Image (tube, rainbow, N blue to C red):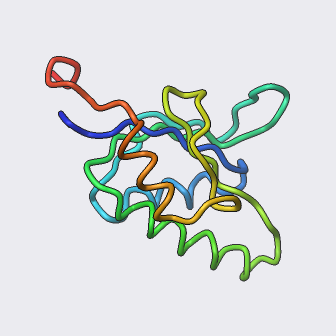
Amino acid sequence: MPGAWIVTIRSVPLRYDELRRVVESTGEARVYFGEALAYLKGEAVALLRIEATGFGWLEALHGWWQQAQKRDGIAFDVRFYIRDREFVGSFQRDRVEALVQRLRERAPRVSASTAA
């Protein structure tokens, strides 16, 4: 998808399938790489790399995240990165609007030559 933003999400492995479903539910984003269980710096995480043409998926994901915590009574976070390792923010620390703004400004974009 030329012009799409490239974003990485990390969260708890238990939530991988739900995360993927919600991210792709709006049609604005697709998971081009995902691992239900990865180990980064000794931490077990679900890892999703996303190409996004908009950010409605992030708002949908935030709504799902709030409901999942209430439903299950278990707190967890969803963290956002660019270039796989540069931390941008998380749902526990940031407002959705602030995350969207930072991702729009800082996330790399898919070039036409990369997408071909």
Q: Residue at x 61, y 51 (%)?
A: 16
Of all residues shown, which one is farthest toward the right? 42
Quarter of the figure that contains the N terminus: top left
Of residues 109 and 36, the one nearer the viewer is 109
Residue in the picture at 61% in, 69% down? 65
**Location of residue 84 in the rendering, given as x and y in whole percent from the top left corner:** 54, 28
Q: Position of residue 14 (x, y in %)?
A: 72, 54
In-front residue for pair 94/110: 94
Q: How many marks?
A: 0
The x, y position of residue 21, in whole percent, is: 46, 60
Q: Where residue 107 appears, x then y in whole percent?
A: 40, 36
Determine which quarter of the picture holds residue 27.
Answer: bottom left
Which residue is found at the position 26% from the left and 29% from the top?
A: 110
Question: In the drawing, does residue 74 fall left or right of residue 30?
Answer: right
Write the residue at 54% across / 68% down: 62
Report the quarter where the C terminus lies: top left
Work out whether 94 lies above or below 113: below
